[in-house]
Each structure stands twice: as structure tokens, then as C-alpha cells.
Image (cartoon, helix red, strand yellow):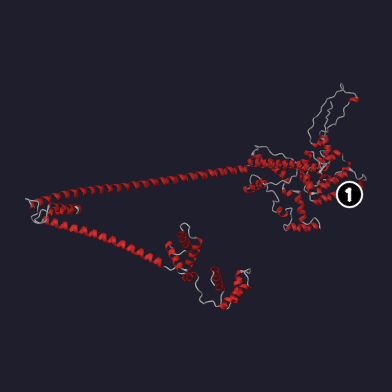
Amino acid sequence: APEYKEREEDNMNGADTPIITSNSTSLDWPAEDELEEVEVQCAGRAYLAYESRLLSLRDFLHGSSFHANNAVDSSAATDSAAADENNKKEYDLLNMSEKKLDKLNYYQVLQRGLPMHSSTEDIRKAYHKACLKYHPDKTGRGEEDAVFLLVKTAFDTLSDPMKRRSYDSTCHFDESIPPEGVEEQDFYTVYGPVFERNLRFASFNDPMRNVKNEAASGGGGGKKKGKNKKNKKGGSNNGGGKDNKKVDKCPPFGDDDTPLDQVHSFYEFWVHFESWRDFSLKAEKSTDHDLEAADSRDEKRWMKQEIDRKVKKMKKEEMARINLLVERAMAADPRLSREKKREKLEKERQAEAKRKAEEEKAEAVRVAKEKQDEENAKKKAEEDAKKKNAKQLKEQQKKQLRKAKQQFRKLTMAAYQAASPNDSSDSDGVWDDMEKMNDDVELLCEKLSAFELDSLSEALGGPNGLAEVREVAIETAAGSERQSLLAIESRNKARKEDADKQKEAKLAKTSAPWTKDELAALSKAIKKYPAGGAARWDAIASFINNLCKQEEPRTKEECIEKYNQIASAPAAKDTTAAPADDKAWTEKEDTLLQDMLRKYPATMEKNERWKSIAEGVPGRSKKECVERFKAIREAVKKGKN
């Protein structure tokens, strides 16, 4: 049974429309007046062959035995492919239906086989050829001929760079990108064509850039040549100099043996990919806004804003698609995968080496610390042993000294009692009484060592033992007193020397004369810190010391003393504050100075004025004239004649 299909639009528009299918037999065939008009969809191999021959996409005898016999040498057919392309018959637009005309793009309308990235000159030549064939004067079909209007529209669109960019952006383009999980062996065959296809919208294929390049090469006439010269120098506002810095081609996609530097360059290009694709026409169609049909400027402005918003969204989606393509390609690229594995292993190796180095360093530090601890412990043990021995020795010496003192006291008392058994007086006259004897004994016990006391104890066994003890006591007392006197004398001498040094330093400081800078600083400080202020003279002394930076700073007492001297002697103050000139000014020189001051007013430049004044006063320099003027001005202020 025949099959009928009804479609609302032409199949070439690509719109998905519902298909109405009905089967009819001779039993339910409707009456003729009840038949519904439907559009029959052409299909089948025969129709496709007919369509291909009609559009000259294949030879008329393609697929026949004649065609097979003539295709024995495939290499010869390949070599003649370019010649066949050039010799293909041009489309006859006059004999094509409206539906078939709609299938052609503007490049095919102007000339069959005209490439999309043709130059402006090639498009102009193709248009001229088409006009010779389809112009109303040639066809006699009138100015409103649809074919000629289509040719004219195609040329108007392709000759305008902006319109051509928008039109090229709307031509059929496969935006699909490979899915995730592509096998390594299929990576190059899957992703290579996709990147090649997307190069259509690369910056170096931009129609606007091609027009600039053609103009720069001198193909646009005399006036354009002049502008292009300016562009070459960087004077263009369209960014001609900037375009020269852009990449003119995409690095190759490569294969499994491509060096990593080229692989990174390829992905670097796509990461910073700049698409010239223009979505203006597509956005205008999707928003159903026709700027030319706007009723007012406000409505046109609103339409333009809506279109621009849609264009911005589409541009964002386009760049997101490119970024997704690059991300998936980089994730599936076996070359980058191998590089990542190598870098990971290298990082692990470096981390392991670093860990081992740190462990070795820590072990060396631990060993050095243990060695140092052992040395410190050994040294401390030795010091403790020395301290212990020294302590034991000291205790032993103390014990010996204590024993020697006890024995010396006992023997001395026994010898003393043996020498005077009946009374406490000393018969030999060594001591006047026992108290003096005890004083000498205690003095000797305090001053002498254990060895010396033992020696005296042994001497007490002789006939003159007590006398010897008395003599030693006298010598010891005299030596102690002499040492005390020497110490006191040395201390007093040191004190006297320090006092003399301080006195000399004070005299040297007070005797230093006041310099001219110090007197000027004193005068400024007295004016700056008037009487009645807190810590006035401390501030004045600090001001003078900070300003003059002398080696010996002035004290506030010196400042007060100098101020009192100047205040009590006005004449001396004038001579110190302002030293008199080597040569006194005469009355004639004063008159000349006053005349020069009137002649050269203060409105002149300062240095030039005083230079001119000094030239008018013979025998006087510029500095002398300035100082004389200041002296006269101070005298006038003070009311002096």
C-alpha cells in the first residue's frame, strides 16, 4: 500500500515535524472529493542518484558498467580530481526550483566551487560572471527576477565584511564534540577532525582580517593604499598593529610521536582560542526581532538590546563548548597522560629523596647531640668531682686549722701557766696579763695558717717559746695595720685623682669659648622659648646642642651664665652677635647704598638685585651690602640713629 507523509515545512529547514502515516487499500479508498492534499516525501536510492546528477554532484553514468570500466586506474582518477572540479558545469539557477535554490549557499549562488574563505577580489569576479549570465538585460525576466535578486543579495552580503562574517557564522557547522571516555587508540582519529573543523572560526580565518590583509597588500585602490601605509606604521584605530601579533596558524595536532613542546603549544593555542563567530543573525532570528521593522527609535533600541543580550549568551555558550572540547581532549590525550605519570613519578622520587635526606640529617643531628650530651656529662662529672675534692680539701684544711688553733691555744696557755704558776702575771715580762696574751693568741689564730700555727706550737716547747709567740704577734699586728693603712691611703688617692679629673674636665668645658654659631643659636633659642615657659633653659640648651652638634654639649648653667654676660654688657653682645666689619662704612658708602636700594626695588630677583646694588657701591661686596642693610634695619627697629 502507498505511504503518505505530511510535513509543515520543507525537509531542508531541518525542523522536526510530526509525520502523518496512513495505509490505504482498495476497500477503504475514499471518494475523490474527500481526498486530502498531502506532500509526498521523496526517498530511496534512485531519488538520491537523481538529486546528485541534477546538482552535478556525480556523473550521469556514475555506477554504470561504463563508469566502472573507465575507473580502472584509481591513481589517474585521483590526479584528475582537481581538473574535474574546475571543469564542473556551473549551476543553472534559472532552471532550478525555488526549493533547490534554497539549498544553495551564497558562495554556490555566485560560483560553483567558490571556497568559503575566498578573497574579496575572487567574490567580485564571481559576481561579475554571474551578472553576465543572470542580469535582467541578459535574461529578459525583469528587475524583480528572483534569481538575479538572489545573486545580488549574495554579493551584497559577501562583499561586506561584517555581513559576510555574520552569514558565514550561520552556515551549516557541526558543533558536536566527542564524548568522554575515548580510547587511546582512537584519540587521534576522533579528536583530530573536530579540532580541524573548529578552526573555521579561528582568528586568522576571520573575514574582517582577510579584508585588512588585502588592503595592506595594496589590492584596494589608491586611497586604501595610503591608509594601509598609515596602518603599517601603527596609526590605525582598528588594531592593525595588534593583528600582526596574533598567531597566523594553529600548531599541528600531531600524533603519538609529537614532542611535548608542540603538544603544549597546540593546547595553549586552543586554551586562548579567539572565535570570530558572529551570532547576530542567529540571535535576530531566535528573538523574532526585525530592526528594520521597528516603529520607533525606542523600540529599535529595545530590540537591539535584546539581540545583543542573546548574542552575548550564544557567544558564552560557544566559548564554553570550545573549553569543554579542550578539557576533554587534554583529559584523553595519551601524550599528556604519559607526561602526568612521569611528573608524578618524578615528584614521588624527589619526595622520597627529600625524606631520606631529612632522615639522614635528623640522624646526624641526633648522633651529634648524643655525643655532645656525653661530652657535657663527662665534663660535668669531672667538674663535680673537682668541686667535691675541693670541698673535701677545704673541709680538711678547716679541720686542720681548727685542730691547729685548739692545740696552739692549749699549748700557749700551758706554757703561760708553767711560766707563772703562782699568779697570773708573766714573770718573764712577755705579757703584762693573761688578757693581752689571749688577744695575741686570737690574733695569731685569725691571721696565721695551720702550718704556721703548728710551727709556733712546736716552738712553744723551747725555752723562748712565749717570747717568740709574742714577737710573731707583734709583727702580725703591725703587718695588718700597715696593710689597712695602705688600703686606706690607696682609696683616698684614687678618690682624689677622680676629683681632680672631674675638676679639670669641668674647667675645660667652662673654658671653651662660645663660637659664632653657638651665639646665633643662643639668640634664636631665647626668642623661641620666652621667659615663663616650663624648663625653658633645658629646652634652650637642647636647641643649641641639636643645632650646632658640638663635641661637648652645653649645659643649661652655661647657657644661663652666657646670657647673663651678654645682658650685662650690651656692647659686647653686639660685637659677638654681629662682628664688626674689617672696614668701617663711611657716610658716602651709606648714601650710595641707600640710592642703590631705591634704584633696585625688592620686586627684582633677590640674587640679581644685591649683585646690582654691590656694583653701585665701589669697594663693597654683595655680602657686605647685605650685612650693612640688615644692621641698618635692626638699628631702625631698635630706635637707634
Tell me where residue 470 sits by quadrant: bottom left
Q: Is residue 382 left or right of residue 167?
A: left
Q: Is residue 252 above or below residue 495?
A: above
The quarter of the rendered structure image containing the C terminus is bottom right
Whole-percent x, y for residue 434 in the image: 12, 52
Could you tell me how many numbered marks the image carries? Answer: 1
Q: Is residue 232 above or below residue 30?
A: below
Q: Is residue 232 left or right of residue 472?
A: right
- Neighbor class of circle 1 (other Cα within 10 Å; few <14, some 14-19, many 20+) is few
Can residue 111 be seen from the camera position used here?
A: no
The quarter of the rendered structure image containing the N terminus is top right
Whole-percent x, y for residue 539 in the image: 47, 59
Q: Is residue 248 left or right of residue 605?
A: right
Q: For the point 64% across and 44% down, which residue is it?
A: 256
| Residue occupying the far left of the picture | 422
Q: Is residue 362 left or right of residue 164?
A: left
Foreground residue among 337 and 6: 6
Q: For the point 39% across and 67% down, which residue is it?
A: 508
| Residue occupying the far top of the picture | 27
Which element is circle 1 on? helix
Foreground residue among 188 and 202: 202
Q: Is residue 266 above or below residue 521?
A: above
Q: Is residue 427 above or below residue 522?
A: above
Whole-percent x, y for residue 177 in the image: 70, 39
Foreground residue among 312 and 637: 637
Tell me where residue 284 sits by quadrant: top right
| Residue occupying the far right of the picture | 140
Can residue 202 be seen from the camera position used here?
A: yes
Foreground residue among 77 and 560: 560
Q: Amino acid at mark 1?
A: Leu
Whole-percent x, y for residue 3 in the image: 83, 28
Identify residue for label 1: 132
